[in-house]
Image (spheres, helix red, strand yellow):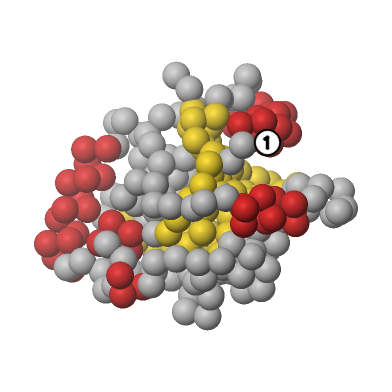
Amino acid sequence: MTGTPEITLHHHGVERHPLIVIDDFWPDPEALREDAASLRMGSIGPHYPGVRATVPPRLADTMRRRIAPLLAEHFGLDPAPAISEAYYSLVTTAPADLAPIQRLPHFDGVERRRIAVLLFLGHGDQGGTAFYRQRATGYESVDGTRLDRFRATLDADVRTHGLPDAAYIAGDTPMYERIAVQPAVFNRALVYAGNTLHCAYLPPEVVLSADPLAGRLTLNLFLFDD
């Protein structure tokens, strides 16, 4: 069992989007690790560089209810958005095997009521999560009014600079500036807007293992409703 959760609020970048960091988030994180290890993980979608398994709905809803007061206070979302997806996630893709889209920062969706919750469940050096600004536009988030310009700028940047090398993005690039990074501390949860530009921070020393008890294991909740 862990101690009392410790909550820290950050506002990163020029746009000052809230980022909530909750240390000692879950009372029994080792039970979550064992649960993940008991499940069959597989590829879900083309973007995540690894394997995933669905989190039990009751567990996901308990986590949603736990952060609901924070969403009301810091994001103005009351009631909290519904759970759209919930996964145990394990990064397994070697840097040399990354698809081009996996080498770039991304956003989960353009909607305002879209929230990402990421809980770090790995021990040892796990890297973290980083947030970015598109240099040419200055965008740190992408909503519906920005989407076309963001995409056109990305296409132009790729024509100018070429695709990034086959590696996990780990800092500033010609196309993106890193504006914040949160280390992956065991049992630390991050809560942030899903339309912010972000990416896993995975320096070379992070071990990528297919064993949930040895690799970079996270639990990811995606909250969204109209």
The percent coordinates of residue 7 (x first, y second) are 76, 47
Q: Which residue is painted at 48% across and 22% down in the image? A: 225
> Farthest residue toward the bottom?
205
In this orientation, which residue lies closer to the viewer: 61 or 174?
61
Q: Is residue 138 visible?
A: no
Q: Position of residue 100 (x, y in %)?
A: 25, 62
The answer to whether 9 appears left or right of 132 in the picture is right
Drawn side of residue 90 relative to residue 29, left or right? left
Percent position of residue 172, x then y: 39, 69
Query: Which residue matches tag 1?
Result: 59
**Of the pair 133 and 116, the residue shown nearer to us:** 116
Residue beneath the point at 22% across and 41% down: 149
Query: The disc labelled 1 sits on which kind of residue?
Result: Leu
Q: Is residue 210 above or below residue 106?
A: below
Residue furthest left as drawn: 159
Query: Which of 138/100 is in front?
Result: 100
Q: What residue lies at 76% left-to-right and 47% top-to-bottom?
A: 26
Residue neighbourhood size for the residue with mark 1, other residues' Cα within 10 Å, grouped as few (<14), some (14–19), many (≥20): few
Number of labels in the image equals: 1
Q: Is residue 24 visible?
A: yes
Q: Secondary structure at mark 1?
A: helix
Compared to 172, does 156 lie above or below? above
In percent of width and height, residue 139 lies at 36, 47
Quadrant position of residue 33:
bottom right
Indicate left or right for 158 with 87 as reference.
left
Q: Quadrant of the C terminus?
A: top left
Residue sitting at x 55%, y 29%: 83
